[in-house]
Image (cartoon, rainbow, N blue to C red):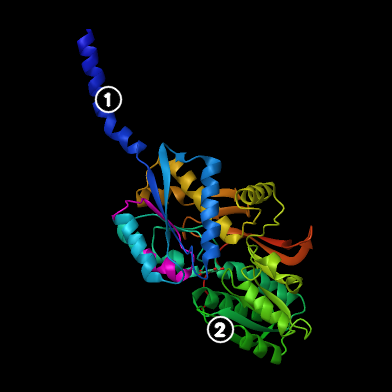
């Protein structure tokens, strides 16, 4: 071949290769929708921090694609805002993956947009069981309330609690938690002597806690969303429920690592079941907690943070399998069945439900090195979201 022909061949090969190569080099935009302001800003702050941490630790390029995160603040419980952001991110900003979703109503609002655009939607926080059924493109890396509630319901029935009162926030995750607690606690021989639901917006726990005290249960089971635990604990202490013989139990949302230490002595002894504790004694978690603290002024990650970190892990590992492709059907097929060791312990994305299976731990609030932590004392491995009871 003479030089001219060789050059022509080279030029042609570049021409032929170019389109694919260009696609592979295009940045991959992830639309991250989180409450960064308002009453649930701690959820947004935690997830934003762990998404950044994951990228910093694993590099901003995966499968030849540079990851760009477009963060949108949906400000609290404003489903229309979440839905509009999801739509605009896909249509105008050309994001290929949606992620975040701090509360159930927000995940519900975005689900139809993901379905219509066939865009993978990674739910990193919201935890109502039914969320995964709202779009075939949803994958969840947080947890579900029924999954988290089973442990404490069984433990209470077996550990001398005969009469329980339930207090939950009045929206879907609260209903999930209450229904599971009642079913499992009753099956173990316990009786529910009262139940209250507290509004999601501007809750005042005082009158509800007083009603609990007046009815003298052995225990109060609580579910409130992340960030609300301090207000519950304050009322529980001020109204003297512990002195009146009422034990505080719940899912770990109430003893959230983000605010637990600031609750002080009233939180000591609270027993919860949950999927994540900053005190989980694994090497993976010790490294995660240390890296989070280093990047965030010594703060602790909480369960929202670990949901964000694992959401990024799922995105990165799936992209490696698809060679950077994000087409909804291909991405979902590659993500289904994925398993890894998270800072929380072993996790799996169930191929049939796209929901997360994980270890649920029983924990007690204790002082460790002068700070309050949820110290794990028992574990239930590989807990799936339980099927709804009829
Ligand atoms: C949800 C929000 C929370 O902050 C939490 O702790 C659990 C569930 C939710 O809205 O799904």
Query: Quadrant of residue 267 in the image?
Result: bottom right
Residue 104 pos. (x, y %): 47, 69
Residue placed furthest toward the front: 297
Magenta span: 92-111
Residue 148 vs residue 280, the one in the foreground: 280
- Disc 1 is placed on an element classified as helix
The stretch drawn in magenta includes residue 96: yes
Give me the residue at 62% from left, 88% from top.
207
Q: Which residue corresponds to the image point at 45% horizontal and 72% vertical from the top-left? A: 77
The answer to the question of whether label 2 and label 1 lie on touching residues, with beta carbons closer than 8 A, is no
- Is 166 displayed left or right of 173 in the figure? right
**What numbered label is drawn on residue 14?**
1
| Residue on which the image places disc 2 | 197
Residue for point 76% across, 81% down: 242
Between 30 and 237, which is closer to the camera in this rendering? 237
As drawn, is 375 to the left or to the right of 48?
Answer: right
Figure check: 327 above or below 21: below
How far apart are labels 2 and 1 at the CA level? 65 Å
345 vs 60: above or below: below
In this view of the protein, can residue 368 be seen by the observer? yes
Looking at the image, the residue that sits furthest to the top is: 2
Task: Give the side of residue 59 with respect to residue 272, left or right.
Answer: left
């Amino acid at each position: 071949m003479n030089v001219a022909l060789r050059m022509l061949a080279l030029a042609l090969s570049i021409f032929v290769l170019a389109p694919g190569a260009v696609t592979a080099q295009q940045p991959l935009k992830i639309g991250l929708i989180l409450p960064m302001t308002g009453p649930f800003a701690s959820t947004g702050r935690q997830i934003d921090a762990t998404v950044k941490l994951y990228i910093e630790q694993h590099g901003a390029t995966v499968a030849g694609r540079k990851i760009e995160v477009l963060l949108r603040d949906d400000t609290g419980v404003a489903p229309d805002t979440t839905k509009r952001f999801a739509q605009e991110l896909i249509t105008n900003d050309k994001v290929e993956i949606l992620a975040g979703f701090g509360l159930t109503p927000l995940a519900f609002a975005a689900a139809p947009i993901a379905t219509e655009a066939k865009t993978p939607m990674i739910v990193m926080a919201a935890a109502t069981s039914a969320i995964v059924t709202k779009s075939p493109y949803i994958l969840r890396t947080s947890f579900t309330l029924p999954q988290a509630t089973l442990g404490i319901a069984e433990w209470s029935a077996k550990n001398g609690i005969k009469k329980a009162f339930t207090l939950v926030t009045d929206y879907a995750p609260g209903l999930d938690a209450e229904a599971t607690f009642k079913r499992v606690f009753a099956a173990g021989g316990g009786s529910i002597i009262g139940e209250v639901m507290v509004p999601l917006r501007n809750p005042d726990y005082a009158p509800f806690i007083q009603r609990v005290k007046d009815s003298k249960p052995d225990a109060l089971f609580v579910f409130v969303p992340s960030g609300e635990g301090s207000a519950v604990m304050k009322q529980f202490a001020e109204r003297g429920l512990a002195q009146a013989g009422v034990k505080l139990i719940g899912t770990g949302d109430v003893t959230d690592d983000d605010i637990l230490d600031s609750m002080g002595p009233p939180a000591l002894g609270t027993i919860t079941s949950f999927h994540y504790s900053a005190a989980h004694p694994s090497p993976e978690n010790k490294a995660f907690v240390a890296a989070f603290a280093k990047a965030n002024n010594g703060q602790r990650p909480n369960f929202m943070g670990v949901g964000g970190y694992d959401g990024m892990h799922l995105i990165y590992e799936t992209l490696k399998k698809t060679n950077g492709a994000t087409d909804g059907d291909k991405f979902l097929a590659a993500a289904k069945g994925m398993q890894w060791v998270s800072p929380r312990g072993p996790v799996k994305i169930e191929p049939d439900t796209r929901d997360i299976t994980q270890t649920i731990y029983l924990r007690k609030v204790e002082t460790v090195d002068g700070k309050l932590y949820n110290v794990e004392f028992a574990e239930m491995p590989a807990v799936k979201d339980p099927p709804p009871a009829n």
